[in-house]
Amino acid sequence: MAIKCSKKKCSSHAIIYQRYSGLHLCEKHFIEDVEKKVKKEIRKQRAVERGDKIAVALSGGKDSSALLYMLKRFFHSRTDLDFIAIAVDEGIKGFRSITLRNAEKMAKELNVELFTFSFEREFGFTLDEIVSRKFEQAPCTFCGVLRRQIIETKAKELGATKVATAHNLDDEVQTILINYMRGDIERLGRLRGRREEFVPRIKPLRMVPEKEVALYALAAGIQIATIRGPYAELSFRFTVKRMLNELERRHPGTKYSLLRGYERLSEFLPKEQSKRKLLRCERCGAPSASRICKACEIVEMMRRDKAQNSPQRALSSQRELGVRCQ
């Protein structure tokens, strides 16, 4: 038997049961609920201000597609605002090409200019190549650093005043818990806001659970790819994600409680801006806590590894071995 929507005077069939709120919501009221959360977060973060040029990090997945759709829906009449999209091709065979097609389609439908950049063009190698080197770190560690570098650099070059990312409730709580578990107070402090050296980041979806973002995208008719990144399960984040999902299943509202707890605790964390002034990376000039930024460290590591394992080096080693054996 179909369950009716919990809203007063609504006789429509529910499409979702929010265990954390106890509400059954029909399609109309579910969309209203999601958009209310996003609008409230936009106001709270002062995410959109007069004259802004906002670069949306668009992967073509459900979250970033829903984010771009909502921003255009909410602010379609604001002639003082400009929205552009930035997509990053990490070089994951059989995965990224699919989501990038979705990104191109979405940007075209919403009349948003899309700028696509790649690891290969910017750094000289792909994520697949990094993975093939079998480094100790998980692929997502490298990917996150390099993606952030491209989005930050290109957003500045394109004149963006803010970068909008599609981090949802699950993403935020995972990051908080990961940093708790690592005892990384500095990174916990960074979640409250970026330093003035960087383009400000906004996260309009941070109060919407991942599953609700996906359902919103379906209800809004947004075409999404169900394919998942092949390296995601190798990360520590994936382990934390599964743990949080199990806690949420057993104790509805856990994710919201963790986020609210962090927000109360964050009042006592040292402000990021009060820390020592950042240096400039000696290689690329980007703001960095050390002489060489993390992205350039990865580039150098890949260059060294390629040099050590190049055919010329292998042939040279074989010749040296032959000389020694004679």
Image (cartoon, helix red, strand yellow):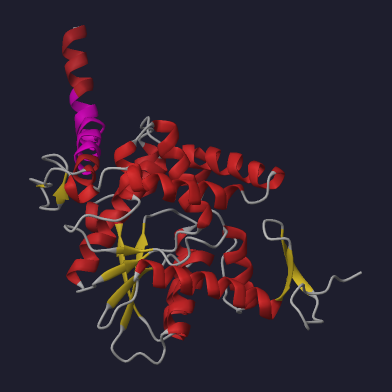
Task: From the viewer's side, name the closer residue of 42 and 174.
Answer: 42
In the rendered image, residue 313 lying in the magenta stretch gets the answer yes
Above or below, 105 relative to 185: below
Q: Residue at x 46, y 52 (%)?
A: 172
Residue 207 to residue 278: above or below: below
Work out whether 135 lies above or below 125.
above
- Is residue 312 depicted above or below 64 in this figure? above
Whether residue 285 is visible: yes
Residue 113 among those drawn in magenta: no
Q: Is residue 326 left or right of residue 94?
A: left
Image spot of residue 196 (x, y percent): 18, 59
The tally of labels here is: 0
The quadrant of the picture occupied by the C terminus is top left
Q: Position of residue 26 (x, y in %)?
A: 73, 76
Residue 297 image offset from top left, x and y in percent: 20, 40
* The N terminus sits in image quarter: bottom right
Measuring 31% from the left and 60% from the top, which residue is drawn there?
Answer: 118
The furthest residue to the right: 1
In which quadrant of the rendered view does residue 47 lie?
bottom left
Q: Position of residue 311 (x, y in %)?
A: 25, 34
Q: Is residue 68 left or right of residue 316?
A: right
The prevailing secondary structure element of the residues shown in magenta is helix
Q: Is residue 228 left or right of residue 309?
A: right
Query: Which residue is rendered at x = 30% and y = 78% of the image?
Result: 49
Magenta-colored span: 299-316
